[in-house]
Image (cartoon, rainbow, N blue to C red):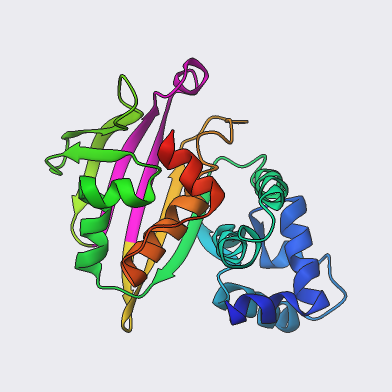
Amino acid sequence: MDDVFKALADPTRRALLDELFRRDGQSLSELEARLPMTRFGVMKHLRVLEDAGLVTTRRRGREKLHLLNPVPIRLVHDRWVSKYAESWAATLSGLKQTLEEDTMEKVFEIYIKTTPERLWRAITDPEQRRRYWFGVGVSSDWTPGSPYEARHPAAPGPIHAGENLEVDPPRRLVQSFDALWSEDAKAEGTSRVTWEIEPVGDSCRLTVIHDQLRDGASPELYGGWPQILSGLKTLLETGESLTTPGSLRYAGG
């Protein structure tokens, strides 16, 4: 978390985040054209933002695109904001929604001090899943082409469901995603969620990519990811569940 505050302390890095706030998924050349500094200078500042997890990158052909990652902002919220002022959460949620507008692909990245095997179990085990996914567990046999279903004890039917498109434990899981919690959510159609686990020293980098979303898809489909991943990190690193107002409200509902 110190890396996040350090990254935000520099006005140039804040300007870069403002540019990505304005339009996510820009290349180095595009960002360089908007700042009064050399290409090398922009690269150095982007590296600091990447190291802090505030920016992630994706390849599109020969271009490397830079995307905002809202997960560190969620972690700052969980650590510093929620216990003091719950009303701020709505402001941050609105900010995150603005950051994610007008893109077809949502990328979330987080580092967790755990092993790939423990992380895979937490993703696929129904009881562990309930502890960080708002009380929703998941059931499947986790083989390629098999179905999966996510349910909450208080709901009459599945919350979401889909097919396991790729299953490569403990490295990669690709799933289709059909939201079923409301008629509006169902109308959004099928999207895709990819979980990528990469060992980094004594930790893992978890990247969640929610893509194949329709243009202008409702943030209801993907807006919960920062809180879900924060809860997953908390569970694996401390054995505890998140107790922020939002997490308790959703888990109870």
Q: Is residue 113 left or right of residue 119?
A: right
Q: Tell me the quarter of the image containing the N terminus.
A: bottom right
In the visual, does 30 lie left or right of 61? Answer: right
Residue 237: % across, % down: 35, 71
**Total numbered labels placed on residues in the image:** 0
Question: Whole-percent x and y of residue 142?
Answer: 15, 44
Q: Residue at x 27, y 40 (%)?
A: 137
Identify which residue is drawn at 55% across, 78% down.
51
User: Front-most of 13 and 181?
Assistant: 181
For the point 34% across and 77% down, the residue is 203
Q: Nearer the viewer, residue 43 or 235?
A: 235
> Residue 221 in magenta?
no
Q: Quadrant of residue 5?
A: bottom right
What's the magenta region? 171-196
For residue 20, what is the image quadrant?
Answer: bottom right
Q: Is residue 194 magenta?
A: yes
Residue 232 on image: x %, y %? 37, 59
Q: Nearer the viewer, residue 183 or 22?
A: 183
Position of the C terminus by quadrant: top left
Judged left or right of residue 117, residue 215 is: right
Q: Nearer the viewer, residue 116 or 138?
A: 138
Q: Is residue 205 above or below residue 100?
A: below
Q: Residue at x 40, y 43 (%)?
A: 134
Q: Is residue 115 visible?
A: yes
Confirm whether residue 62 shows in the render: no
Name the residue at the right extreme.
Answer: 36
**Looking at the picture, how far across and down is residue 60, in whole percent?**
52, 55
Quarter of the image for residue 122 reads bottom left
